[in-house]
Amino acid sequence: VQLQAFGGGLVQPGGSLRLSCAVSGLTYHYYAIGWFRQAPGKEREGVSCINSSDGSTDYADSVKGRFTISRDNTKNTVYLQMNSLKPEDTAVYYCGARSGYGCPKGSRFFGSWGQGTQLTVSS
């Protein structure tokens, strides 16, 4: 299983950006893809998650109403649309996968981490 996050960059506060997570090699019948982020000196925290079977989603309270997770099964890609970005959203963003249904809290439930992508929100 390989996941690769990309699409990060420098954005002004209030701006928008879309991250992509390219997924390959998944053979699980049911799985979830989660977006996580890690700022310098902080633990990796969950941002959003989507279940493959029914498309149900989950969000961290800090991003609800601003971020939207979606998937394109034809492209094996999961997206994270980020709007109304704030400086505190600055972090390296990673995507991870887990087998089964559900979006448990905690990065320890996910794996197959690829390289992250840096998002910097600054004026």
Image: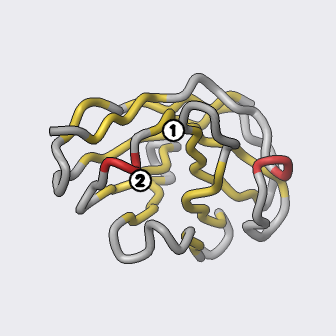
In the picture, the quarter occupied by the C terminus is top left
Q: How busy is the neighbourhood of tag 1: few (under 14 within 10 Å), some, or many (20 plus)?
A: many
Figure check: 24 above or below 57: above
Residue shown at 17% from the left, 52% from the top: 15
Image position of 55 (left or right of 112):
left
The kind of residue tagged 2 is Leu
In the picture, the quarter occupied by the N terminus is top right
Figure check: 8 above or below 99: above
Pick whichever, 28 or 48, lies toward us. 48
Pick whichever, 28 or 86, lies toward us. 86
What number of labels is visible?
A: 2
**Closer to us: mark 1 or mark 2?**
1
The disc label shown at residue 93, or none: 1
Image position of 42 (left or right of 8):
right
Image position of 1 (left or right of 63):
right
Q: Which quarter of the picture shows residue 38?
A: top right
